[in-house]
Image: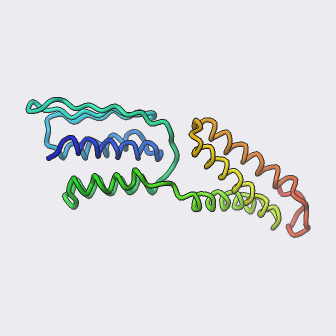
Amino acid sequence: MDYKLLLDTAVMAGEILLESGAETWRVEDTMLRMLRMSGLKTADVLALTTGFVVTLDDPSMDSMTVMRSVESRATDLNRIHAVNQLSRDFCEGNIDLDALFHRVRDIYRAKPEIKKNLLAMMATTAGFAIMFGAGFYEVLASALAGFISGIGVYGGKKAGMQSFLVNCIGDHGSERHYHCIHHAPRTGCGDHECSV
Protein backbone atom coordinates (compact mmCIF):
# COMPACT_ATOMS: atom_id res chain seq x y z
CA MET A 1 0.00 0.00 0.00
CA ASP A 2 1.15 3.54 -0.80
CA TYR A 3 1.17 5.06 2.70
CA LYS A 4 1.88 8.57 1.42
CA LEU A 5 -1.16 8.42 -0.87
CA LEU A 6 -3.28 7.10 2.00
CA LEU A 7 -2.12 9.94 4.24
CA ASP A 8 -2.76 12.55 1.53
CA THR A 9 -6.24 11.12 0.95
CA ALA A 10 -7.10 11.14 4.66
CA VAL A 11 -5.83 14.73 4.97
CA MET A 12 -7.99 15.87 2.05
CA ALA A 13 -10.98 14.07 3.55
CA GLY A 14 -10.35 15.72 6.92
CA GLU A 15 -10.13 19.16 5.33
CA ILE A 16 -13.39 18.64 3.47
CA LEU A 17 -15.13 17.48 6.64
CA LEU A 18 -13.88 20.37 8.80
CA GLU A 19 -14.62 22.98 6.14
CA SER A 20 -18.10 21.52 5.71
CA GLY A 21 -18.97 21.80 9.40
CA ALA A 22 -18.50 18.21 10.54
CA GLU A 23 -18.02 17.58 14.24
CA THR A 24 -14.41 17.06 15.33
CA TRP A 25 -15.16 13.52 16.54
CA ARG A 26 -16.52 12.67 13.09
CA VAL A 27 -13.40 14.06 11.42
CA GLU A 28 -11.16 12.03 13.73
CA ASP A 29 -13.25 8.87 13.32
CA THR A 30 -13.41 9.05 9.51
CA MET A 31 -9.70 9.78 9.10
CA LEU A 32 -8.68 7.15 11.66
CA ARG A 33 -10.74 4.42 9.98
CA MET A 34 -9.10 5.21 6.66
CA LEU A 35 -5.59 5.27 8.15
CA ARG A 36 -6.07 2.00 10.04
CA MET A 37 -6.54 0.26 6.71
CA SER A 38 -2.76 0.66 6.34
CA GLY A 39 -2.16 -2.03 8.96
CA LEU A 40 0.62 0.09 10.46
CA LYS A 41 1.30 0.06 14.20
CA THR A 42 0.40 3.71 14.82
CA ALA A 43 -2.32 5.81 13.23
CA ASP A 44 -3.29 8.90 15.24
CA VAL A 45 -5.55 11.86 14.53
CA LEU A 46 -6.24 14.91 16.66
CA ALA A 47 -8.92 17.18 15.21
CA LEU A 48 -9.81 20.62 16.53
CA THR A 49 -12.30 23.07 15.10
CA THR A 50 -9.53 24.99 13.35
CA GLY A 51 -7.36 22.14 12.09
CA PHE A 52 -5.92 18.71 12.73
CA VAL A 53 -2.73 16.69 13.15
CA VAL A 54 -2.40 13.19 11.73
CA THR A 55 0.42 10.66 12.11
CA LEU A 56 1.25 7.32 10.53
CA ASP A 57 4.13 5.37 12.07
CA ASP A 58 5.58 1.89 12.12
CA PRO A 59 8.98 0.37 13.05
CA SER A 60 9.46 -0.55 9.39
CA MET A 61 9.33 3.06 8.11
CA ASP A 62 9.94 6.71 8.94
CA SER A 63 7.11 8.46 10.74
CA MET A 64 4.81 10.68 8.62
CA THR A 65 3.00 13.56 10.31
CA VAL A 66 0.83 16.22 8.71
CA MET A 67 -0.69 19.26 10.38
CA ARG A 68 -3.40 21.16 8.54
CA SER A 69 -5.12 24.42 9.43
CA VAL A 70 -8.65 25.09 8.20
CA GLU A 71 -9.49 28.75 7.75
CA SER A 72 -13.00 28.69 6.32
CA ARG A 73 -16.02 26.80 7.59
CA ALA A 74 -19.55 26.44 6.31
CA THR A 75 -22.25 23.83 6.56
CA ASP A 76 -22.44 21.39 3.66
CA LEU A 77 -24.04 18.12 4.67
CA ASN A 78 -23.77 16.74 1.13
CA ARG A 79 -19.98 16.93 1.20
CA ILE A 80 -19.87 15.38 4.69
CA HIS A 81 -22.09 12.52 3.54
CA ALA A 82 -20.08 11.97 0.36
CA VAL A 83 -16.75 11.74 2.20
CA ASN A 84 -18.18 9.47 4.91
CA GLN A 85 -19.67 7.17 2.28
CA LEU A 86 -16.36 6.95 0.42
CA SER A 87 -14.61 6.15 3.70
CA ARG A 88 -17.12 3.36 4.39
CA ASP A 89 -16.69 1.98 0.87
CA PHE A 90 -12.90 1.99 1.26
CA CYS A 91 -12.99 0.31 4.67
CA GLU A 92 -15.39 -2.37 3.39
CA GLY A 93 -13.11 -3.07 0.41
CA ASN A 94 -15.58 -1.80 -2.22
CA ILE A 95 -13.07 0.69 -3.68
CA ASP A 96 -9.29 0.72 -3.73
CA LEU A 97 -6.98 3.49 -2.49
CA ASP A 98 -6.42 4.98 -5.94
CA ALA A 99 -10.18 5.28 -6.60
CA LEU A 100 -10.69 6.71 -3.11
CA PHE A 101 -8.01 9.35 -3.70
CA HIS A 102 -9.51 10.45 -7.03
CA ARG A 103 -13.07 10.64 -5.68
CA VAL A 104 -12.04 12.56 -2.57
CA ARG A 105 -9.98 14.90 -4.75
CA ASP A 106 -13.03 15.52 -6.97
CA ILE A 107 -15.05 16.53 -3.91
CA TYR A 108 -12.15 18.67 -2.67
CA ARG A 109 -11.87 20.52 -5.99
CA ALA A 110 -15.62 20.94 -6.59
CA LYS A 111 -16.73 24.55 -6.63
CA PRO A 112 -19.80 25.61 -4.66
CA GLU A 113 -22.95 25.83 -6.73
CA ILE A 114 -23.77 29.53 -6.47
CA LYS A 115 -27.16 29.22 -8.18
CA LYS A 116 -28.39 26.61 -5.74
CA ASN A 117 -27.03 28.57 -2.76
CA LEU A 118 -28.72 31.78 -3.90
CA LEU A 119 -32.02 29.98 -4.47
CA ALA A 120 -31.75 28.41 -1.03
CA MET A 121 -31.11 31.80 0.60
CA MET A 122 -34.04 33.33 -1.26
CA ALA A 123 -36.32 30.44 -0.30
CA THR A 124 -35.22 30.62 3.33
CA THR A 125 -35.85 34.33 3.72
CA ALA A 126 -39.16 34.13 1.84
CA GLY A 127 -40.11 31.11 3.96
CA PHE A 128 -39.56 33.07 7.17
CA ALA A 129 -41.67 35.91 5.80
CA ILE A 130 -44.47 33.45 5.04
CA MET A 131 -44.10 31.89 8.48
CA PHE A 132 -44.60 35.32 10.06
CA GLY A 133 -47.73 35.95 7.99
CA ALA A 134 -46.31 38.34 5.38
CA GLY A 135 -48.26 39.33 2.30
CA PHE A 136 -47.24 38.61 -1.29
CA TYR A 137 -45.09 41.72 -1.82
CA GLU A 138 -43.42 41.30 1.55
CA VAL A 139 -42.47 37.75 0.61
CA LEU A 140 -41.00 39.06 -2.65
CA ALA A 141 -39.07 41.73 -0.76
CA SER A 142 -37.76 39.06 1.61
CA ALA A 143 -36.64 36.86 -1.28
CA LEU A 144 -34.85 39.86 -2.79
CA ALA A 145 -33.12 40.56 0.54
CA GLY A 146 -32.00 36.91 0.66
CA PHE A 147 -30.65 37.19 -2.87
CA ILE A 148 -28.71 40.38 -2.04
CA SER A 149 -27.35 38.82 1.14
CA GLY A 150 -26.27 35.74 -0.82
CA ILE A 151 -24.49 37.84 -3.44
CA GLY A 152 -22.69 39.71 -0.64
CA VAL A 153 -21.56 36.49 1.03
CA TYR A 154 -20.48 34.96 -2.27
CA GLY A 155 -18.58 38.14 -3.23
CA GLY A 156 -16.88 38.27 0.16
CA LYS A 157 -15.73 34.67 -0.12
CA LYS A 158 -14.59 35.19 -3.70
CA ALA A 159 -12.58 38.25 -2.64
CA GLY A 160 -10.83 36.17 0.03
CA MET A 161 -12.29 38.05 2.97
CA GLN A 162 -11.98 36.58 6.46
CA SER A 163 -14.96 34.46 7.47
CA PHE A 164 -15.85 36.92 10.24
CA LEU A 165 -16.33 39.69 7.68
CA VAL A 166 -18.27 37.39 5.36
CA ASN A 167 -20.58 36.53 8.26
CA CYS A 168 -21.04 40.25 8.95
CA ILE A 169 -22.11 40.73 5.34
CA GLY A 170 -24.64 37.92 5.72
CA ASP A 171 -25.90 39.39 9.00
CA HIS A 172 -26.25 42.80 7.38
CA GLY A 173 -28.34 41.12 4.68
CA SER A 174 -30.51 39.60 7.41
CA GLU A 175 -31.00 43.04 8.91
CA ARG A 176 -32.00 44.33 5.48
CA HIS A 177 -34.43 41.41 5.33
CA TYR A 178 -36.18 42.70 8.43
CA HIS A 179 -36.36 46.24 7.04
CA CYS A 180 -37.68 45.00 3.69
CA ILE A 181 -40.55 43.24 5.44
CA HIS A 182 -41.22 45.93 7.99
CA HIS A 183 -41.13 48.84 5.54
CA ALA A 184 -42.56 47.16 2.46
CA PRO A 185 -45.64 48.92 1.12
CA ARG A 186 -48.83 47.49 2.55
CA THR A 187 -51.00 46.09 -0.20
CA GLY A 188 -53.94 44.75 1.72
CA CYS A 189 -53.20 41.29 0.30
CA GLY A 190 -52.33 39.85 3.72
CA ASP A 191 -54.68 39.15 6.60
CA HIS A 192 -53.23 41.97 8.68
CA GLU A 193 -51.38 45.17 8.02
CA CYS A 194 -48.19 44.70 10.04
CA SER A 195 -46.60 41.27 9.66
CA VAL A 196 -43.56 41.62 11.90
In the current view of this chain or complex, which residue is farthest to the left?
A: 60
Percent position of residue 190, x then y = 85, 67
In the picture, measured across the screen, residue 18 lies left or right of residue 114, that is left
Camera-nearest residue between 125 and 166:
166
Measured along the vertical axis of the image, is residue 103 above or below residue 50?
below
Q: Position of residue 164 (x, y in %)?
A: 61, 35
- Looking at the image, the residue that sits furthest to the bottom is 189
Snapshot colouring: rainbow
Q: Residue at x 66, y 52 (%)?
A: 151
Q: Would you say 114 lies left or right of 70 here?
A: right
| Residue 64 position by quadrant | top left
Q: Position of residue 113 (x, y in %)?
A: 53, 58
Using residue 167 as the reference point, say whether residue 130 is left or right of it: right
Q: Quadrant of residue 39?
A: top left
- The answer to whether 151 is drawn above or below residue 23 in the figure is below
Q: Residue at x 57, y 46 (%)?
A: 158
Task: Name the spot of residue 165 as percent of width and height, x first.
Answer: 64, 36
Between 153 and 90, the residue placed more toward the observer is 153
Name which residue lies at 9% across and 30% down. Answer: 59
Q: How many marks?
A: 0
Residue extending farthest front: 159
Residue at position x 87%, y 57% from top? 184
